[in-house]
Image (cartoon, rainbow, N blue to C red):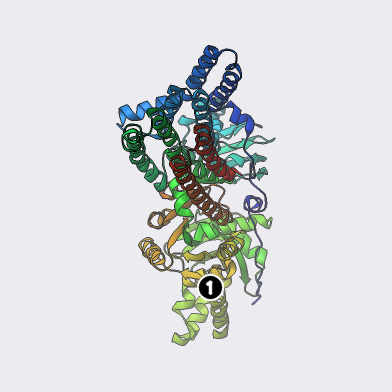
């Protein structure tokens, strides 16, 4: 027997590039030109300019100054006044917009035109900054929409026809010219080129594509022409799924923001009631003059308004979502940023998540009298007519070794066992190693029959094959037996390969104090091997989909919030049961992506540690903002009644705090 034990070294270029290179736009700072193009920002700055001109002209023309102030009020306050009135009429509720407009008009009513204009200007400026954060987030998340291809060159009966992408069906053959957008998800049928996949996966470097490689709609072809066979319709493409995710991401609001919005209505009523009480009650109870009471009420109306508090959350969440989107991590809403921050356990599915999801040949063991090339070529020729994943792995290995495949004849599947076929007159069979179990040495009654059936010279040969099979399976590999004309010719072992980033990803999570678990339906032996290679400490194997759900609940009870990462249909229940479900964007199934709360568009699991850190950073920023906002409001309210805070100081203090919390949130854009 000739034992050739040669591990096959393979790596996916795209995975390696994704792991080692930064994605597009990382570390990007706020774009001030884009900020100035924002219409609300233009209105706010216009209001501020008119306020300054009005203040400068007040000394020589009071009527002109007042007219300019009125225009400044209108330009800066129109949008907010409209929003406040709509809330009052449609929802029969008060909001901070109406309070600010009322305070500005009240200041003007007692002659403080400049203070009222300053209030409008700073309030409009803070609103414009928040609008910019929203716009920036939506732009980063939905920038792919601008790349949506509209038509494709379909080859039909030897002719090329320009058709709508909505008309494409799986099996159609397309021509993608150099520099064009790939119109649909598919497989390269012929040709070679490089593809810029940054819009889909976040990879900053182009990826080489040859026949058999996957391509995605919305990516940009390089210098070579590609013939692409469509594998998914427009709706089922990765691009179509992204569009759906974008729509969901732009509508969902965090729970904390919902609470603030409910609180805002109640708080606004209290502020209005106290304002009225100060105006009407203090002259009677405390002997203040009407002007003094009205002035105090206007200052209170300004400083007590919850502008900074209301702006403490959404700019932070939108900025976190935006920076995550640039790294290929797509949140379906701000609520999931909040829950992501509380993650205590990351539970990975094994196949397609910690591993590549495609088996590869790792070992070829040949019997005496058989050459490796002969055995692999014959088996690959037969398996080339099969679509089984293990068959594809064998054919791929033969191609890698540049083996010319002979012609296989009389190929047929052996139900429940494997496949057989004739190559150069020899009948080859490949399939399960059941015979080694069925005729275990300790159970042999007729040794001669067994020896003759398996083609071994003596029972010691059978024992050796059995030991080799046990060793390979102990390494988590799937082993197939190969016979030639009934003689034992060898064993071939295959195994799903670990993602290049898996060990580093697990190590980073553990360093953050996050537990890492593996939930898999695979055999315990295979799971144990992957766990050793990746460093996963909590391993749960042999799980059905419903068992994964139970295990997620147990992890939540024991450790706290759970982030589940998966790619298959069988992972969907566990993704739904976890605190946060994360789907693999490139390799994930449609069901997994639909159920997931977050999508890892580039399948780079190293980014999971980063996004948890970013979510925690967002959570800390929200707490900082809320503490700061409440402290400023309480200090200004106390100062107004105890130390006579001037209206300009109240305006600057209150609106300044609002701008500061928004700018603090915008830091997460980097």
In x, y percent, where is residue 380? 59, 58
Looking at the picture, tell me which residue is in the foreground, 67 or 204. Answer: 67
Please state if 176 lies on the left or on the right of 417 as rendered.
right
In x, y percent, where is residue 655? 51, 36
Callout count: 1
Please state if 267 lies on the left or on the right of 354 as rendered.
left
Residue 215 in view here: no
Q: Is residue 324 above or below residue 380?
A: above
Q: Which residue lies under the disc numbered 1? A: 473
Looking at the picture, tell me which residue is in the foreground, 367 or 163. Answer: 163
Q: In this view, does 91 lie above or below 453?
A: above
Which element carries disc 1, helix, strand or loop? helix
Q: Residue furthest front?
A: 287
Residue 18 in view here: yes
Looking at the picture, tell me which residue is in the foreground, 247 or 32. Answer: 32
In x, y percent, where is residue 306? 43, 40
Task: Identify the image quadrant of the C terminus.
Answer: top right
Q: Residue at x 57, y 48 (%)?
A: 602
Q: Which residue is drawn at 56% across and 44% down?
A: 664
Please state if 80 lies on the left or on the right of 185 as rendered.
left
Q: In this view, does 185 lie above or below 40?
A: below
Task: Identify the image quadrant of the N terminus.
Answer: bottom right
In x, y percent, where is residue 382? 55, 57
């Amino acid at each position: 027997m000739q034992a050739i034990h040669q591990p096959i070294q393979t790596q996916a270029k795209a995975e390696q590039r994704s792991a080692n290179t930064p994605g597009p736009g990382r570390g990007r700072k706020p774009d001030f030109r884009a900020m100035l193009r924002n219409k609300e920002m233009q209105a706010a700055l216009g209001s501020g300019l008119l306020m300054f001109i009005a203040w400068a002209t007040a000394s020589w023309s009071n009527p002109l100054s007042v007219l300019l102030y009125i225009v400044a009020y209108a330009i800066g306050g129109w949008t907010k006044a409209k929003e406040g009135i709509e809330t009052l009429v449609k929802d029969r509720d008060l909001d901070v917009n109406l309070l600010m407009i009322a305070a500005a008009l009240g200041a003007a009513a007692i002659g403080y035109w400049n203070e009222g204009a300053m209030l409008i200007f700073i309030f409009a400026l803070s609103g414009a900054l928040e609008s910019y954060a929203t716009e920036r987030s939506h732009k980063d998340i939905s920038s792919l929409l601008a790349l949506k291809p509209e038509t494709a060159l379909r080859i039909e009966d030897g002719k090329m026809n320009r058709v709508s992408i909505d008309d494409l069906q799986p099996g159609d053959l397309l021509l993608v010219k150099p520099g064009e957008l790939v119109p649909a998800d598919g497989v390269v049928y012929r040709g070679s080129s490089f593809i810029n996949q940054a819009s889909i996966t976040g990879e900053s470097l182009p990826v080489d594509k040859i026949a058999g490689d996957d391509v995605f709609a919305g990516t940009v072809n390089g210098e070579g022409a590609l013939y692409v066979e469509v594998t998914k319709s427009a709706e089922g493409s990765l691009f179509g799924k992204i569009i759906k995710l974008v729509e969901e991401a732009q509508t969902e609001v965090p729970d904390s923001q919902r609470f603030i919005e409910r609180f805002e209505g109640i708080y606004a009523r209290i502020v209005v009631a106290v304002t009225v009480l100060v105006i009407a009650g203090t002259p009677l109870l405390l002997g203040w003059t009407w002007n003094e009471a009205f002035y105090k009420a206007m200052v209170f109306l300004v400083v007590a308004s919850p502008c900074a508090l209301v702006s403490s959350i959404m700019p932070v969440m939108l900025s976190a979502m935006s920076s995550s989107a640039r790294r290929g991590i797509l949140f379906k809403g701000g609520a999931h940023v909040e829950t992501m921050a509380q993650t205590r356990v990351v539970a990975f599915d094994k196949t397609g998540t910690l591993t590549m999801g495609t088996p590869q040949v790792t070992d070829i063991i040949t019997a005496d009298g058989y050459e490796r090339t002969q055995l692999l070529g014959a088996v690959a020729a037969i398996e080339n007519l099969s679509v089984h994943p293990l068959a594809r792995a064998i054919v791929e290995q033969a191609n890698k070794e540049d083996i010319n495949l002979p012609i296989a004849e009389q190929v047929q599947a052996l139900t429940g066992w494997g496949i057989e076929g004739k190559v150069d007159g020899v009948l080859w069979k490949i399939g399960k190693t059941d015979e080694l179990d069925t005729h275990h040495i300790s159970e042999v009654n007729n040794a001669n029959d067994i020896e003759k059936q398996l083609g071994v010279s003596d029972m010691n040969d059978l024992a050796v094959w059995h030991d080799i099979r046990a060793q390979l399976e102990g390494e988590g590999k799937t082993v197939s037996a190969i016979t030639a004309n009934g003689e034992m010719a060898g064993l071939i072992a295959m195994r799903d390969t670990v993602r290049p980033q898996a060990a580093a990803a697990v190590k980073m999570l553990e360093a953050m104090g996050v537990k890492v678990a593996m939930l898999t339906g695979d055999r315990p032996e295979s799971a144990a091997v992957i766990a050793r290679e990746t460093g996963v400490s909590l391993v749960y194997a042999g799980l059905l989909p419903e068992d994964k759900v139970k295990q997620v609940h147990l992890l939540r009870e024991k450790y706290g919030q759970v982030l589940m990462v998966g790619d298959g249909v069988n992972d969907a229940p566990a993704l739904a049961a976890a605190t946060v479900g994360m789907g693999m964007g490139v390799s994930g199934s449609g069901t997994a992506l639909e159920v997931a709360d977050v999508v890892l568009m580039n399948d780079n699991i190293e980014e999971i540690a980063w996004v948890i850190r970013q979510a925690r950073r967002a959570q800390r920023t929200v707490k900082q903002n809320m503490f700061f906002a409440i402290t400023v409001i309480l200090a200004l309210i106390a100062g107004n009644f105890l130390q006579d805070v001037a209206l300009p100081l109240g305006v600057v203090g209150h609106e300044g705090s609002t701008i500061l919390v928004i700018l603090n949130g915008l830091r997460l854009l980097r």
